[in-house]
Image (tube, helix red, strand yellow):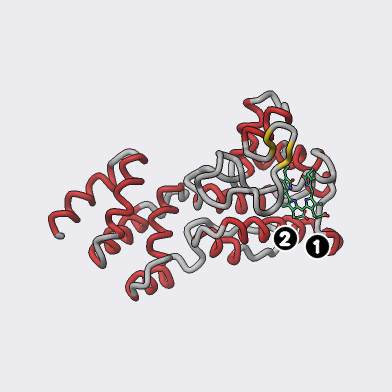
């Protein structure tokens, strides 16, 4: 195993994302020594913003029973690898934890709840948003939610991914829905069972945004200045 470890450590640190993606599960198979390499990797990269490769490494440690992994995360990354910044005093820990275990369906629900919390008590009670509320939502908080989704989905899910696809289609909703798996022909995908709650989903499939009351709220979200400003 020492040999295996050495032959994996170098490409983990210096390899392309594709190589890194393949190596992380191999290290996970190698027991404590593999976990040590993943811990070293996360520490080395921690001054840079986390990307989905960090997310993969973190998830292996988070889902491991090994005491050393638990202790490492408790002391070095108690709130995960995405800074849980909020301008509104909102706690994103539950969202972080659900995404770390890849429970995308529960994470989607929490995302809807947090978006309502961001708009205040009347939106929480109503359980859905007005587009005017979305326009006034904190960019910092939206970026936190989005970064959590990106980092824990191999960069597949998140509002910024949906925005990029939407813009690439000239904001054409009828082309956008099938592209992200929300509609097939004339049929809306039905909530919740027809949606795909894992990484086999199309890019941009999650998080969901109910279209029952029209596209205006989602259009506001995808047009929010949070996505064109640099992260603070
Ligand atoms: N639902 O169909 N959706 C709900 C989606 C539509 C409907 C929730 C997404 C079309 C009803 C979420 C799509 C439609 C409820 C989503 C989708 C429809 C409901 C839970 C594809 C009928 C019960 C959160 C665009 C043709 C709630 C919430 C209610 C719930 C998401 C029906 C996340 C992405 C037009 C009847 N749907 N939704 O918002 O308000 O309740 O009655 O988009």
Foreground of the two, 113 or 186:
186
Q: Which of marks 2 and 1 is nearer the N terminus?
A: 2
Which residue is at 64% across, 65% downward? Answer: 91
Q: Which residue lies furthest to the left in this view?
A: 3
Give the residue drawn at x 28%, y 54%: 26
In x, y percent, where is residue 76? 41, 67
Question: Mark 2 = which residue?
Answer: 113
Judging by the rendered image, the residue that carries numbered circle 1 is 124
3D distance between C-alphas at marks 2 and 1? 7 Å
Tag 2 and tag 1, C-beta contact below 8 Å: yes
Left or right of residue 2, residue 20 in this image:
right
Which type of secondary structure does the marked residue at label 2 adopt?
helix
Q: Give residue 10's position: percent from left, percent from top.
A: 22, 47
Left or right: residue 8 versus residue 2 is right
Residue farthest toward the top in the current orientation of the protein: 170
What is the number of the mark on residue 94? Answer: none
């Amino acid at each position: 195993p020492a040999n295996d470890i050495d032959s994996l450590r170098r490409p983990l640190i210096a390899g392309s994302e594709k190589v890194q993606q393949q190596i992380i599960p191999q290290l996970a198979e190698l027991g404590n020594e593999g976990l040590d390499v993943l811990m070293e990797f996360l520490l080395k990269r921690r001054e840079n913003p986390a990307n989905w490769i960090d997310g993969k490494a973190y998830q292996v440690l988070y889902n491991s029973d090994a005491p050393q992994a638990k202790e490492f995360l408790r002391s070095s990354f108690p709130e995960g690898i995405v800074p849980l910044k909020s301008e509104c005093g909102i706690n994103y820990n539950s969202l972080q934890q659900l995404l770390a275990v890849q429970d995308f369906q529960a994470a989607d629900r929490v995302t809807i709840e947090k978006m309502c919390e961001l708009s205040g008590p009347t939106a929480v009670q109503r359980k859905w948003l007005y587009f005017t509320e979305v326009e006034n939502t904190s960019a910092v908080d939206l970026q936190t939610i989005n970064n959590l989704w990106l980092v824990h989905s191999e960069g597949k899910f998140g509002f910024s991914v949906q925005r990029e696809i939407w813009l690439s289609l000239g904001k054409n909703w009828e082309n956008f829905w099938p592209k992200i798996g929300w509609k097939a022909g004339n049929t809306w995908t039905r909530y919740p069972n027809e949606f795909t709650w894992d990484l086999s989903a199309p890019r941009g499939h999650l998080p969901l945004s109910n279209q029952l009351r029209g596209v205006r709220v989602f259009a506001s979200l995808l047009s929010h200045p949070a996505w064109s400003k640099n992260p603070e």
